[in-house]
Image (spheres, rainbow, N blue to C red):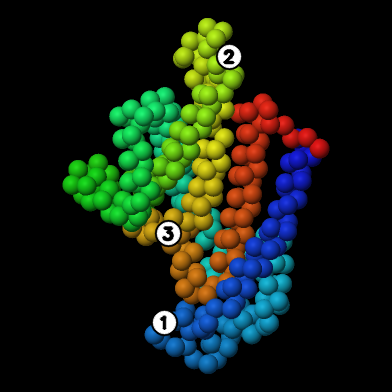
Amino acid sequence: MVGYILKRLLQVIPVFIGATLLIYFLVFAMPGDPIAALFGDKQPSKQLHDALVAQYHLDQPFIVQYWYYLTGIFRGDMGTTFSGRSVNDVLAATLPVTGRLAVMAIGIEFTLAIIIGTFSALRKGKIFDNSMLVLSLFFISLPIFVIAFLAQYFLAVKLQWFSPTVGATNDWGDMWLPAIVLGLSLYAVSMRLMRGSVIDTLNQDWVRTAYSKGLPRRRVIPVHVLRNSLIPVITNSATNFGVLLVGATVTEGIFNIPGVGNTLFQAIRQHEGSTVVSFVTVFVIIYVLVNLVVDMLYGLLDPRIRYVR
């Protein structure tokens, strides 16, 4: 197990270099002048323009710019935005906001998927099962901005159960409405995976053996069925968590959430290579670690899975 974990951690190194190099090249290859984009309609003087170009090494070749960035990363310095703010400070301010949103959304998705998916599988072909399948198809087909606007209008404006926007307060309580929107948009796929996995597990020999030994259903379902049916749902939820950490840009924009999505979108528009690549670097590391934790959970959920040489 220890060797497997070390092997997976070593895989972060080439993934880290490859991802940062690719993203930095894409930002570098974007047309336009980032310094001019920073000032908008008001163009800076030539002296100021040249000074900013030299300060951010924009007059250097691509590989030199990347080297400056990479050496800064190893010193713990992710660079500076064109507005003069440290990327470390930007990341420290925005990542917790998106992290709270992602945790709440995944919690809602995972809970709904397990409960509804399990009940649908146990009532396969009945009214509840068919209704949930139709409802899940509805959420899969509906764009997330439509769900967001409907929830914002009916739940926040009409019923006044939630605040319509988040803004600067962005604590756990303010995140419920956007988290519900994201959770509903994601749960449909996980619910179908859970339903199919439970149906498949119910037909396994060890479940029939458990029933033949006289074990009650309240014992067989949670211990023998659910535990062996969670793997595809956990895998899908881990993927969704990584995607949400990258930034639910549309949802953050609709609910005015000062998170990663909005910040990353603005950085791309302004050609802020250090900001974009720094965010991607953190996301790559988090994504690899989340998948490593999921791999560890496989062995706990299914005893047949073992990490051997």
Q: Which residue lies furthest to the left in this view?
A: 158
Q: 141 or 11: nearer the eye?
A: 141
Q: Position of residue 89 (x, y in %)?
A: 54, 60
- Pointers 1 and 2 in contact (CB under 8 A)? no
Between label 1 and label 2, give the one nearer the viewer: 2
Say which residue label 2 marks: 209
Mark 1: which amino acid? Gly
The residue drawn where x is 36% and y is 42% is 136
User: Label for residue 52?
Assistant: none
Say which residue label 1 marks: 40
Q: 281 or 109: nearer the eye?
A: 109
Residue 255 sits in which quadrant?
bottom left
Q: 305 or 42: nearer the eye?
A: 305
Q: How far apart are marks 2 and 3 (CA)?
A: 49 Å
The residue drawn where x is 76% and y is 46% is 7
User: Label for residue 249?
Assistant: 3
Mark before the other along the chain sequence, 1 or 2:
1
Mark 2: which amino acid? Thr
Q: Where is residue 237 in the image (x, y as percent from the top left)?
A: 51, 42
- Pointers 2 and 3 in contact (CB under 8 A)? no
Please tell me whether residue 274 is drawn above or below residue 248 in the rendered image.
below
Please tell me whether residue 218 is drawn above or below residue 258 in the rendered image.
above
Q: Residue furthest top?
A: 214
Q: Relative to 43, is 235 on the left or the right?
A: right
The residue drawn where x is 57% and y is 61% is 279
Mark 3: which amino acid? Thr
